[in-house]
Image (spheres, helix red, strand yellow):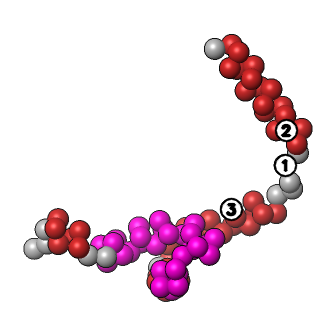
Amino acid sequence: MTTDATNAARDPAELDPCRHAVLQLWDYLDGRLPDRDRAWVAAHLETCHACTSHYTFEQAFLDKLRAAPPADPRLDALRQRVLGAIREKR
C-alpha cells in the first residue's frame, strides 16, 4: 500500500506518465527542456498514441502561429481605442 508520503517522494512521471508528458509539451516544443526531460518526453511520445495526439495538435498550432502574417499595427491601435472607451464608460 502506498501513502501520500510515498507518492510525494516518487517521480511524477511514474505516477501519471501521460499527464507528466502533456504538461511538458510546450517546453518540449519550444526546446526549453533539459536533455534528460526532453529524451523522456520523446520516448513517451514514441509509444503513447494518446499523448502523440496532444503533441500533433500543439505542433500544428505553433506551425499555424508561425505562418500567420505579422499583426497589423492598425489593429493594435483600434484595440487600444476600444479598451480606452470601455474604461471611460466604467
- Secondary structure at badge 1 equals loop
Q: Are marks 2 and 1 in contact (CB under 8 Å)?
A: yes
32 magenta-colored: yes
The crowd level at tag 1 (other Cα within 10 Å; few <14, some 14-19, many 20+) is: few
Q: In what quadrant of the picture does the C terminus appear? A: top right
- Image point (74%, 67%), residue name: 63
Magenta span main SS: helix
Q: Nearer the viewer, mark 3 or mark 1?
A: 1
Q: Is residue 45 visible?
A: no
Provide the residue span drawn in magenta. Answer: 12-39
Q: Position of residue 28 (x, y in %)?
A: 57, 74
CA distance separating discs 2 and 1? 7 Å
CA distance separating discs 3 and 2? 22 Å
The crowd level at tag 3 (other Cα within 10 Å; few <14, some 14-19, many 20+) is: few
Q: Are marks 3 and 1 in contact (CB under 8 Å)?
A: no
- Image point (17%, 72%), residue name: 6
- Secondary structure at badge 2 equals helix
The crowd level at tag 2 (other Cα within 10 Å; few <14, some 14-19, many 20+) is: few
Q: Amino acid at mark 2?
A: Leu
Tag on residue 61? 3
CA distance separating discs 3 and 1? 17 Å
Q: Nearer the viewer, residue 33 or 49?
A: 33
Q: Position of residue 2 (x, y in %)?
A: 14, 72
Q: Nearer the viewer, mark 3 or mark 2?
A: 2
Q: How many marks?
A: 3
28 magenta-colored: yes
**Residue at the disc numbered 1:** 71
Q: Amino acid at mark 3?
A: Phe
Q: Amino acid at mark 1?
A: Ala
In the image, residue 45 sits, relative to residue 56, either above or below, namely below
**Residue at the disc numbered 2:** 75
Q: Position of residue 39 (x, y in %)?
A: 51, 86
